[in-house]
Amino acid sequence: MRLDDAIRHRGFRRWYEHQLYESHAYLVTGFLALIMMAIALEVVDFRRSWSGAVMLVAVGGAGGAICIFAWRQFTRILAQAEYVAEQATCPGCHAYARFAVDRGEEHPDAVAGWVLHVRCRACGTAWRIA
């Protein structure tokens, strides 16, 4: 879902909360994959059978790949959410997260990939979240 649509649909606070839940789910997944990798590599016994050893090394490699993927997703989602949250304060009345999204533009240079044009619900001040 596009960033502007997601914030319109859920509201900023619920969107932010959802991003934190999602990013931390990736963190837990990565941690469990790291444990899986460590166990698989610890159990490898090359003297018994090569097929079993190859299987355990493959499981360990898969665990490492999942761990790296999960860590990258965790940091990407969390950084994006924090970056948007830093700009969610109205410059006019300093109300936090009390804005409505007027429109969103896809912008490749923005951290979140989108530039949001928002308006404060309290005082009506307009600003950009880039």
Image: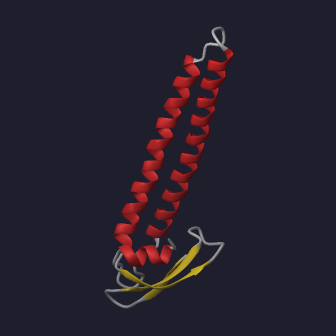
Question: Residue 119 at x, y = what percent?
Answer: 42, 87
Q: Residue at x 50, y 71 (%)?
A: 1
Q: How is the image coloured?
A: secondary structure
From what the image shows, is residue 24 above or below residue 12?
above
Q: Residue at x 48, y 77 (%)?
A: 4
Question: Residue 39 at x, y = what percent?
Answer: 52, 24
Question: Residue 8 at x, y = what percent?
Answer: 41, 79
From what the image shows, is residue 108 above or below residue 78?
below
Q: Nearer the viewer, residue 33 or 96?
A: 33
* Relative to 32, 48 lies left or right: right
Farthest residue, direction top: 47
Farthest residue, direction left: 122
Q: Quadrant of residue 89?
A: bottom left
Q: Nearer the viewer, residue 14 or 120?
A: 14
Q: Residue at x 43, y 55 (%)?
A: 22
**Residue 78 visible from this viewpoint:** yes
Quarter that holds the C terminus: bottom right
Q: Nearer the viewer, residue 113 or 128?
A: 113
* Relative to 10, 44 lies left or right: right
Question: Residue 105 at x, y = what percent?
Answer: 58, 82
